[in-house]
Image (cartoon, rainbow, N blue to C red):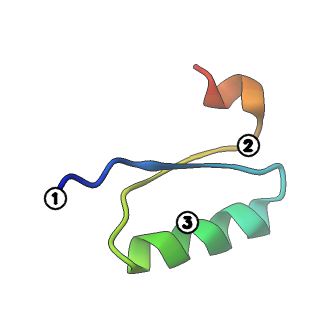
Amino acid sequence: MVNHPVLIVDDEVEMRIAMSETLKHCGYPVEISHNAIDALK
């Protein structure tokens, strides 16, 4: 099974960290970004 990275985009640091840690704990690779412009790069 291939796990494609989950992209988290949120301007709140605490929310990015919480979502990232939860998904990583469940075995998902995670990419994070603090805004849509950076997420599209």
Looking at this rendering, what residue extends furthest in the top direction?
Answer: 41
The amino acid type, in three-letter code, at marker 3 is: Ser
On-image quarter of the C terminus = top right
Residue 37's tag is: none
10 Å crowding of disc 3: few (<14), some (14-19), many (20+): many
Instruction: Tell me which residue sits at (36%, 57%) in the image.
Output: 29
Q: Is residue 15 left or right of residue 18?
A: right
On-image quarter of the N terminus = bottom left
- Would you place residue 22 above or below residue 28 in this image? below
Q: Circle 2 sits on which residue?
A: 34
Q: Circle 1 sits on which residue?
A: 1
Instruction: Tell me which residue sits at (37%, 64%) in the image.
Output: 28
Q: Circle 3 sits on which residue?
A: 20
Q: Earlier in the sequence, mark 1 or mark 3?
A: 1
Q: Earlier in the sequence, mark 1 or mark 2?
A: 1
Relative image position of residue 26 (x, y in whole percent): 39, 78
10 Å crowding of disc 2: few (<14), some (14-19), many (20+): some
Question: Dot 3: what SS?
Answer: helix
The amino acid type, in three-letter code, at marker 1 is: Met
Mark pair 2, 3: CA separation: 12 Å
In depth, the one of 2 and 18 nearer the eye is 2
Query: Which quadrant of the figure has residue 25?
Result: bottom left
Question: Dot 1: what SS?
Answer: loop
Relative image position of residue 15 (x, y in whole percent): 75, 67
The amino acid type, in three-letter code, at marker 2 is: His
Mark pair 1, 2: CA separation: 29 Å
Relative image position of residue 19 (x, y in whole percent): 62, 69
Relative image position of residue 38 (x, y in whole percent): 67, 27
